[in-house]
Amino acid sequence: MSERVLDLRGLKCPLPAMRVRKKLRDLTSGELIVAECTDPLAAIDIPNLLRQTGDTLEDKAEAGGVLTFTIRKK
């Protein structure tokens, strides 16, 4: 399965979480999203979103001011 990269750089809360939610609806079980965000609130919003949806946060990293979330659709 391929991973889909979402470039959410420059978007402010709540847009990164909303875009991740929308993309998750389009995926089938087991597919991956890699969301790249610059909004520091995404570090709170995206994990909270995943608790609501039941999808899995596979990895979270930060480099150069970019937060990267690897998410697996349940």
Image: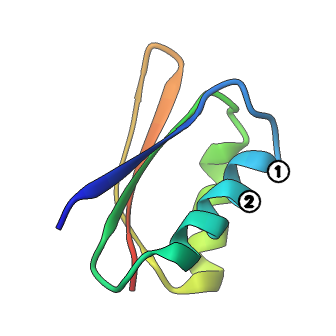
In the displayed structure, 36 sits above or below 49; it is: above
Where is mark 2, residue-wise? 18
Give neighbour class at mark 2: few <14, some 14-19, many 20+ (Cα, 10 Å): some
Q: Where is residue 62 in the image (x, y as percent from the top left)?
A: 43, 29
Label 1 crowding class (10 Å Cα cut-off): few <14, some 14-19, many 20+?
few
Amino acid type, label 2: Met
Give the left or right position of residue 43, taking residue 33 as reference.
Answer: right
Q: Is mark 1 on a helix, strand or loop?
A: loop
- Which residue is identified by label 1? 14
**Extreme-top residue of the structure:** 64
User: Which residue appears at 64% of the width and 68% of the height?
Assistant: 21
Please state if 45 lies on the left or on the right of 59 as rendered. Answer: right
Residue 22 figure quarter: bottom right
Q: How far apart are marks 1 and 2 (CA)?
A: 6 Å
Q: Residue drawn 59% across and 84% down?
A: 53
- Where on the picture, by quarter, is residue 18? bottom right
Q: Do the residues labelled 1 and 2 touch (CB within 8 Å)?
A: yes
Q: In this view, does 45 lie above or below 15?
A: below
Q: Quadrant of the N terminus?
A: bottom left
| Secondary structure under the numbered disc 2 in the rendered image | helix
Q: Is residue 19 left or right of residue 14?
A: left
Q: Which amino acid does label 1 sit on?
A: Pro
